[in-house]
Amino acid sequence: MEIATTTAIKEQKRRLVLGYIYRHRHASRQDLAQALPISPPTITQNLNDLEDSGLIKRSGFLDSNGGRRAQIYSFDQTARIAIGVEILGSSVALQAYDLYGERLAGRTHMIDYDNGDEYYEAVAGHVNDFIEAIAAKLSVDESSILGVAFAVQGIVSPDGSHLTFGMILGNTGLTLSRLSERIPHPCRLIHDSHASAIAELWLDDAIANATCIYLDEHVGCAVISDGQINEGENLRNGTCEHMTLAIDGPECYCGQRGCMDVYTSRAALLDDSGCDSLAEFFSRAHDGDDDCARRLDRYLTYLAHAIKNARTVLSNDVIIGGRIAYLMSDDDFAALRKKTDAIASFPDDRFAIIRSVCSQGQNILGAALSYIKPFLDEEIDTRARR
């Protein structure tokens, strides 16, 4: 028991030292001795061990005040790297992130999805080439790769082995092994909406409870509870995109009718609008084009009803993200707020509708973070991480 207790104490001190350096990006022995309840000899031993592990490195000296200059130790943010991959119907996007969640590089390959071996061989080749290029650029060994996370438009099985629902690309039943068997690194599948919500929490750790709605080619949703992604036992929590907004409405890709996705996806704005892109549509809608303005107003009405319905189940604040949200103006958000207030079931219903703080590629960042965050939580005292 004493040995186990001693080991736990040593490990906690190591995590405190590394956590302080991670949070401040660099520190001297004196900084650590003043900030942490750890003796100087123990700090020195931990610095040596962490330097040997490659998680910190020497990065110069503090200015001298007359005595010996203090050595500065910096956190090596590229000591581990994670790869996020977004698979869409016509493209595969890859991005690499360091341990601060900062983007190192990215590539996009225009390749039509096909649920066949040739396609998966091509994707694996792109991933392996990308990792090789990153390792060469940063002069790191490929062993520093934590893993490759594939953000997919589908629901992943609880054990992570396959897709239980992949109606958008027609790949229900796709196994992780078909993607990973040619990639010599850990791999995982992750629902793209859940990945986006992971990024949401990373960028704003003050979020406690929220329903996230991501508006894009298709709609995706996720639930945050007590600061964690609440996926549910079957990883289907928060799939608001398939709530029914209109009985006998247009057919959804899931096979049912009148789903939220039908009324709040990209097609709901662009189909028969004469616009070639979302950017063109919003430009015309905001510049007074009557048809585009009416379409946008109708879109916001359906979105308001979807928010109301979601809040009858979970009384959370609502985060709106995705490519469509990036193009919505402050006036659009104000109009959405007004519409939700007008149909509120309870007169005292007070909640926030928040624009996502993330930029493009949120689901790819979140996918990579699914490897980065667990690594940091294991290595660093969580009180010092953010």
Image (cartoon, rainbow, N blue to C red):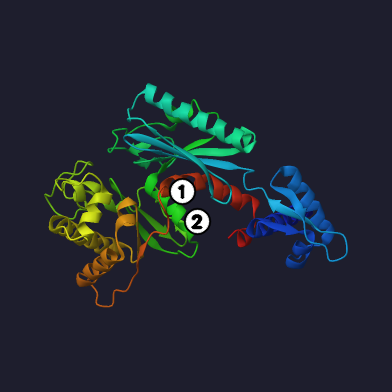
Q: Which amino acid, mark 1?
A: Gly
What's the residue at 69%, 56% (across, down)? 26
Is label 2 in contact with label 1 (beta carbons under 8 Å)? yes
Per the model, the C-alpha gap separating discs 2 and 1 is 8 Å
Residue 100, above or below 383 = above
**Between 100 and 72, the one nearer to me in the picture:** 72
**Between 339 and 248, the one nearer to me in the picture:** 339
Q: Which amino acid, mark 2?
A: Trp
Give the quarter of the figure containing the C terminus: bottom right
Under tag 1, what secondary structure?
helix
- Percent x, y for residue 60? 76, 52
Left or right of 162: which side holds 69?
Answer: right
- Percent x, y for residue 211? 35, 59
| Residue 230 visible in the displayed image | yes
Left or right of 304: which side holds 361?
Answer: right
The single residue placed furthest to the bottom in the displayed view is 348
Check residue 202 in the rendering and tell me which mark sits there, or answer none: 2
Left or right of 223: which side holds 304?
Answer: left
* Mark toward the start of the polypeptide (2 vs 1): 2
Q: Is the residue marked by circle 2 packed among few (<14), some (14-19), or many (20+) residues within 10 Å?
A: some
The single residue placed furthest to the right in the displayed view is 67
